[in-house]
Image (spheres, rainbow, N blue to C red):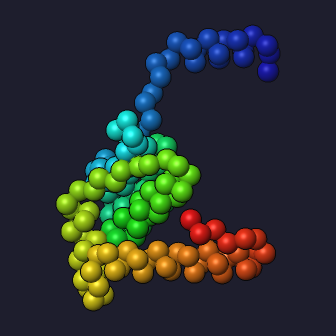
Amino acid sequence: MSRNSKVKRDARKKKEPSRPIRRLGAAMQPHAQLLDDQDASVGGVGWRDGEWLLVLGAQVVARSESAAMALAMLKHVVAVQAGAGHELRLEASPALLNNASREAAALGHTLDEYLAALEQERRERALEASAVTGTAPSTH
């Protein structure tokens, strides 16, 4: 390959219009936001293609088919940030809250009871993981 062909190829790439990134699947429907003290959104939960997606810092960091689990993840983020001195406010849509409440009721719990049980389960998994790795358990 000659040096000129690379120069020509680079020049051709510059002339081509940029193509937007096409995402596969439906558009995300926002259902919850984490807002800081200036009301800037720092994360949230959205519904797309049959899953609840947890978004933090413009990145999908977790996904679940459970609305209650998505809500529990948001509440955990709020608790972790409060422990670090950063207050966040959680605003959730009625659809997310209703779906999470139905999941809890199907298991014979109120939403608050079910979220507490999910948090306890998360803490137990963290303890088990720390025992395996030999590190201090994270309470957050």
Total residue callouts: 0
* Residue 114 point in image, percent of width and height: 35, 79
Evaluate whether residue 25 shows in this view: no
| Place of residue 80 in the rendered image (x, y in percent of width and height, measured from the top left) | 52, 58
Res 106 quadrant in image: bottom left
**132 or 140: nearer the viewer:** 140
Q: Residue at x 34, y 71 (%)?
A: 68
Instruction: Examine the image and state in which quarter residue 116 appears.
Output: bottom left
Q: Quadrant of residue 48?
A: bottom left
Residue at 45% x, 35% y is: 21
- Horizontally, residue 26 falls left or right of residue 23, namely left
79 vs 111, left or right, is right
Quarter of the image with the N terminus is: top right
Tell me, yes or no, if residue 121 can be seen here.
yes
Residue at 56% across / 14% down in the picture? 14
Q: Is residue 113 left or right of residue 137?
A: left
Q: Position of residue 136 (x, y in %)?
A: 73, 71
* Residue 41 picture location, percent across and down: 38, 41
Which residue occupies the foreground of this view, 77 or 25?
77
Please tell me which residue lies in front, 36 or 62.
36
**Residue at the location (47% across, 60% down)?**
79
Q: Nearer the viewer, residue 112 or 3?
A: 112
For the C terminus, the quadrant is bottom right
